[in-house]
Amino acid sequence: MSAPLLMVCSAFLFATMGVCVKLASAYYAAGEIVFYRGLIGALFIAGITRVRGGTLRTPVPAMHFWRSVVGVLSLGLWFYALGHLPLATAMTLNYMSSVWMAMFLIGGAVLMGGRDSIDGRLVSTILLGFLGVALVLRPTMESNQLWYGVAGLLSGMLAAMAYLQVTALGRIGEPEYRVVFYFSLGGMGAGALSMLATGAQGHTWGSGALLVATGVLATTAQMMMTRAYAIGHALSNASLQYLGIAFAFGYGVLLFDDAVTWMALAGMLLIVGAGLGATLLRARQAPAVTTSSVEP
């Protein structure tokens, strides 16, 4: 399968996973969904590793630990937002990670005393992205759901931090499947602690199927994305990844009767444009950052 087709399929599966998370949120807390998503992902990766004759032993457990902490926090906040916001809104806020990455790049330049080297176009993409956030959240704030919007926004910021950690792991030779495995273990651990604090819910055939579907869809989409970034062009992949917002928008309108407003649509387009612009400018200024091992 070609890289573009892999990315389109991955974006569709991630959006479908978002539907499952939103439906499962009627039965389970976000932490419990994170637990089962991690459990299924860990079993899936462990099975693939065994078949391929690989190893899950790592020489850098501390790096995996901190990557998992940040990544799982991002995932939990994203699932929390998915349960309470329109589907496309929650997806879009999580996709702000590329804009956050640009902001980190500028912040690093300032701290290192390199203010003169800051690209004004990169600053413009950041401002454009946050203007998009304001438009996306405008209908949300009228419904007294601002906190859920903040949670979605924080999930994107933490995802950007996780991308940086994944890049560091890749540079020292850690394979993607190992990164995904320990991320899944981290989700299991955090989810188990959450369930100890709040209690675990009982299962029905329907609710259990939603949990299984969430794990299978997320892991399959992640593996497809990993393969696409391995064989395709990074910028093309990043562009196609934003189709996830379009798929989520369609799902939201068809399945959840989400309102269609010009402000939300304009905000989504601004965030997509800002994300693509930031990705292109970062690719010219610094080594590319892969998102192949992190959920969007």
Image (spheres, helix red, strand yellow):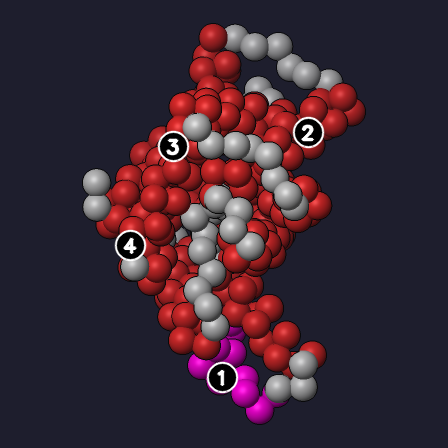
The x, y position of residue 33, in whole percent, is 57, 27
- Distance between the alpha carbons at the discs numbered 4 and 3: 18 Å
- Distance between the alpha carbons at the discs numbered 4 and 2: 33 Å
Which labelled disc corresponds to residue 232? 4
Residue visible at 68% across and 16% down? 200
Mark 1, secondary structure of its residue: loop
Would you say residue 216 is visible in this rendering?
A: no
- Distance between the alpha carbons at the discs numbered 1 and 4: 27 Å
Q: Is residue 94 above or below residue 52?
A: below
- How many discs mark residues in the rendered view? 4
Q: Nearer the viewer, mark 4 or mark 3?
A: 4
The chief SS type of the magenta part is helix
Q: Which contiguous range is marked in magenta?
A: 115-132
Which labelled disc corresponds to residue 189? 2
In the drawing, does residue 123 fall left or right of residue 264? right
Q: Is residue 131 above or below residue 136?
A: below
Q: Is residue 11 above or below residue 133?
A: above
Q: Quadrant of residue 161?
A: bottom right
Q: Nearer the viewer, mark 1 or mark 4?
A: 4
Amino acid type, residue under disc 4 in the picture = Gly
Disc 3: which residue: 220
Earlier along the polypeptide chain: callout 1 or callout 4?
Answer: 1
> What crowding class fits label 2: few (fewer than 14 Cα within 10 Å), some (14-19), or many (20 or more)?
some
On-image quarter of the N terminus? top left
- Distance between the alpha carbons at the discs numbered 1 and 2: 41 Å
Which labelled disc corresponds to residue 119? 1
Amino acid type, residue under disc 3 in the picture = Thr
Q: Are marks 1 and 4 in contact (CB under 8 Å)?
A: no
